[in-house]
Amino acid sequence: MCGLLGAVAKSPVNQLLYDGLQVLQHRGQDAAGIVTADGPNFHMHKGGGLVRDVFRTRDMRLLVGNSGIGHCRYPTAGSANSFDEAQPMYVNSPFGIVLGHNGNLTNSDKLKVELFRQDLRHVNTNSDSEVLLNVFAHELQKSSVGVNLTTEAIFEAVKGVHRRVKGAYAVVAMISGYGLLAFRDPFGIRPLVYGMRQKGSEQEYLVASETVALDTLGFKYVRDVEPGEAVFISNDGMVSEQQCAANPMRYPCIFEYVYLARPDSVIDGISVHETRMRMGETLASRIKSQYSDLKIDVVIPIPESSRPSAMEIADGIGVPYREGFIKNRYIGRTFIMPGREVREKSVRQKLNAIGSEFKGKNVLLVDDSIVRGTTSREIVQMARDAGATQVYFASAAPPVRFPNVYGIDMPSSKELIAHGRDEEAIAAEIGVDRIIYQTVEDLIAGCASFNPKITQFETSCFTGEYVTGDVSADYLASVECERNDEKLSSVFEATADLDLDVING
């Protein structure tokens, strides 16, 4: 997952993009970059780390121009720590193009071969974003006539991308001298929205991964970019839109609502906060109907994103809600830390239990999801060390049994605690007395209830069903090899918080 921004304004956009990336920091803290356009010239600065650490005053002064794109990166493919793979990425032919990408291409290796042998283009990194950039550039070269580029040619190039590229991708790109392009894969797996604000008698536009960026920067939400659609905003503010996919279908990633997106965002017309509340409501119903034998004294969330669900559970089953863990906001997210020992140590540094909320009580801990179980096991032990009599655990998401290949760097199946285990075995692994999971059916129904136009979601990490139809057993085996914990330092631990860890320090 990554955070994307694109702006076309009537005044310098460097500060606008910087502020927007700060708002989207939860979507990636590995690297950040901004490119601005001043006439036909691009100005770029990017580097590793948080947005606030990448950009200094001297860097911002060089980012001149009234249009630009920004990106904050969490790597899901390629080398985790390579500066070369920080985005946006650039090519100079057939036109100067910079591009930022959120998602993951499932046929990246095949495309690399095509680019080299057929398109005569060279890819310098392991990043699938560079592959996507070169595919788009080649398709743009095919559709354009000489040095003249039309909006129709741009849309034809996006059509070519959709024909060749498989997987999940939300994209913002700038074409030198022409304008800003945004498009989404034909399944709409990764989110992308755009908004507008009035500047005197003219309009300014902002494209972003989440509506929270529009809200905080003073833009009015216009709509989501549709699956398969391309939106082009020229440098003079003219907006053109076209459906570029032959058979678009809407399958938004359900994990955005469970865990990835900020709670104050709305994705495809569905409020993230409201879905998390609904997850708690359905879990409360399950507990009352199927777990009535549990004597729960208190409901305690694991900060931060599980709070809405925990509050609804407590209200639904009629027991007190309490804050039992204090979080150190200056510790980085454990899901990107290399190695199990480092992650376990970081959990203890990041969370500390308030003993009076646990001592002598039967405690129901609530988290958004459980992936590896490493963090969950540590937190359960903290609750027992604080004096809890019984420890139960509720997950707002169903069991995560399969890898995600669409832009979330989940571990291989053998590292997933729910893979090949039933609930009793999972409870034993993390050391709880009982474990309670959301059902896939309740999760889908809860999210869909807020937008009846959406009836299907991308749920592969729960069901093993991959909507793009090209994910084979061989591909999953190659992903498993790449994401081996000993080989890839960027790893995913779902009980780490994404929503507020790195916002405002």
Image (cartoon, rainbow, N blue to C red):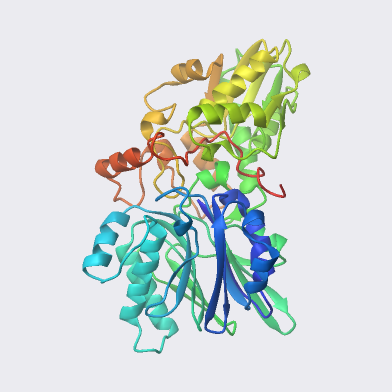
Position of residue 19 in the picture relative to residue 85 (left or right): right
| Residue at image location 56% in from the left, 41% down from the top | 258
Q: Residue 169 location in percent, x, y?
A: 43, 58
Q: Is residue 63 or residue 23 the one in the foreground?
A: 63
| Residue at image location 60% in from the left, 31% down from the top | 346
Image quadrant assignment for residue 125: bottom left
Residue 286 seen: no
Q: Residue 8 location in percent, x, y?
A: 60, 76
Q: Residue furthest right?
A: 356
Q: Residue 13 location in percent, x, y?
A: 65, 72
Q: Residue 290 location in percent, x, y?
A: 55, 20
Q: Is residue 489 or residue 301 the one in the foreground?
A: 489
Q: Is residue 465 or residue 444 the one in the foreground?
A: 465
Number of labelled discs? Answer: 0
Position of residue 105 in the picture relative to residue 114 (left or right): right
Position of residue 202 in the picture relative to residue 461 (left or right): right
Residue 498 seen: yes
- Vertical arrangement, residue 60 with respect to residue 465, above or below: below
- Vertical arrangement, residue 380 with respect to residue 212, above or below: above
Q: Residue furthest front?
A: 58
- Vertical arrangement, residue 89 with respect to residue 97, above or below: above
- Vertical arrangement, residue 7 with respect to residue 71, above or below: below
| Residue at image location 49% in from the left, 36% down from the top | 338
Q: Is residue 95 or residue 274 the one in the foreground?
A: 95
Image quadrant assignment for residue 187: bottom left
Image quadrant assignment for residue 204: bottom right
| Residue at image location 67% in from the left, 51% down from the top | 264
